[in-house]
Image: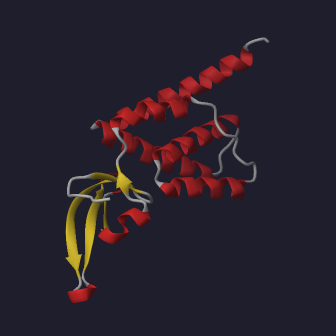
C-alpha cells in the first residue's frame, strides 16, 4: 500500500496519526526512506521505514461510514472475559496490539461490561483507557470531529447496550 504526506493512518502501537513527511537516511545502498507520522494524542513523532509500513500494521484511518458499525459493536452483548487475570490481560494486549478498530471496540465493550460486573485490576483499567483513547481518537479523526464528541458517542453506545441487557434480564419469561 502506498502512503502519502497528509494521509491519516493508524499505527498499531501508538494509535491515530498523520503522515507529516518523508525522510531519507543513510547513504548509497544503505539508504532508507522513512515516513514521519505525528501522533497528536501522545505528542509523538514516529519514524517508520517505508518498506515496513504494512508489515508493522500501519493502515489508513477507518472510513467515516464504519463508525455506525463500531457504535453497534459497542452496544452489542459482550464476550465473557477469562476470570484468570493473566489469561484475560494477554488476550486484551494482543487485541490492542493489532490496531484494528473492531478489536479496539471489542476491548472497550468487554472491559466496560467486566467493570460493571465487578472490579477491574489496575492493568485492566489501563487497557480499557488505552483502548478507549485510541478508539475515540480514530473516530474523531475519521469524522473530522473532536475526541470529546467521540467519547460521548462511545458512552452513549455502551450505556444503551447495558440498558438493553438490563431490560432483557428484568423481563419475565
Q: Quadrant of the N terminus?
A: bottom left
Which residue occupies the extreme top position in the image?
A: 172
**Residue 105 percent across, percent down from the top left:** 51, 41
Q: Quadrant of the C terminus?
A: top right
Up the image or down, 158 lies above or below 107; here it is above
**Is the residue 10 above or below the residue 21 in the image?**
above
Residue at x 31% of width, y 54% of height = 17
In the image, taking residue 132 as reference, residue 25 lies left or right, namely left
List x then y, in percent, for residue 135: 44, 44
What residue is drawn where x is 73% and y is 48%? 82
The colour scheme used to paint the residues is: secondary structure
Quarter of image, res 34: bottom left
Spot occupied by residue 126 in the image (x, y as percentages of width and height): 55, 52
Q: Is residue 170 above or below residue 75?
A: above
Q: Is residue 156 visible?
A: yes
In the image, is 59 to the left or to the right of 173? left
Q: Residue placed at 73% from the left, 20% from the top?
A: 169
The total number of labels drawn is 0
**Rendered location of residue 171, percent (x, y):** 73, 13
- Does any portion of residue 146 appear in the rendered image? no
Amino acid at each position: 500500500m502506498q502512503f502519502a504526506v497528509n494521509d491519516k493512518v493508524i499505527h498499531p502501537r501508538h494509535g491515530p496519526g498523520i503522515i507529516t513527511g518523508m525522510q531519507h537516511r543513510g547513504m548509497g545502498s544503505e539508504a532508507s526512506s522513512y515516513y514521519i507520522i505525528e501522533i497528536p494524542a501522545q505528542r509523538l513523532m514516529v519514524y517508520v521505514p517505508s518498506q515496513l509500513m504494512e508489515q508493522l500494521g500501519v493502515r489508513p484511518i477507518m472510513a467515516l461510514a464504519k463508525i455506525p458499525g463500531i457504535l453497534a459493536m459497542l452496544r452489542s452483548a459482550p464476550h465473557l472475559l477469562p476470570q484468570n487475570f493473566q489469561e484475560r490481560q494477554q488476550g486484551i494486549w494482543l487485541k490492542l496490539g493489532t490496531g484494528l478498530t473492531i478489536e479496539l471496540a471489542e476491548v472497550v465493550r468487554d472491559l466496560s461490561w467486566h467493570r460493571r460486573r465487578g472490579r477491574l485490576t489496575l492493568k485492566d483499567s489501563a487497557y480499557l483507557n488505552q483502548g478507549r483513547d485510541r478508539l475515540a481518537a480514530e473516530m474523531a479523526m475519521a469524522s473530522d470531529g473532536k475526541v470529546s464528541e467521540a467519547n460521548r458517542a462511545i458512552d452513549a453506545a455502551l450505556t444503551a447496550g447495558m440498558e438493553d441487557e438490563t431490560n432483557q434480564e428484568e423481563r419475565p419469561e
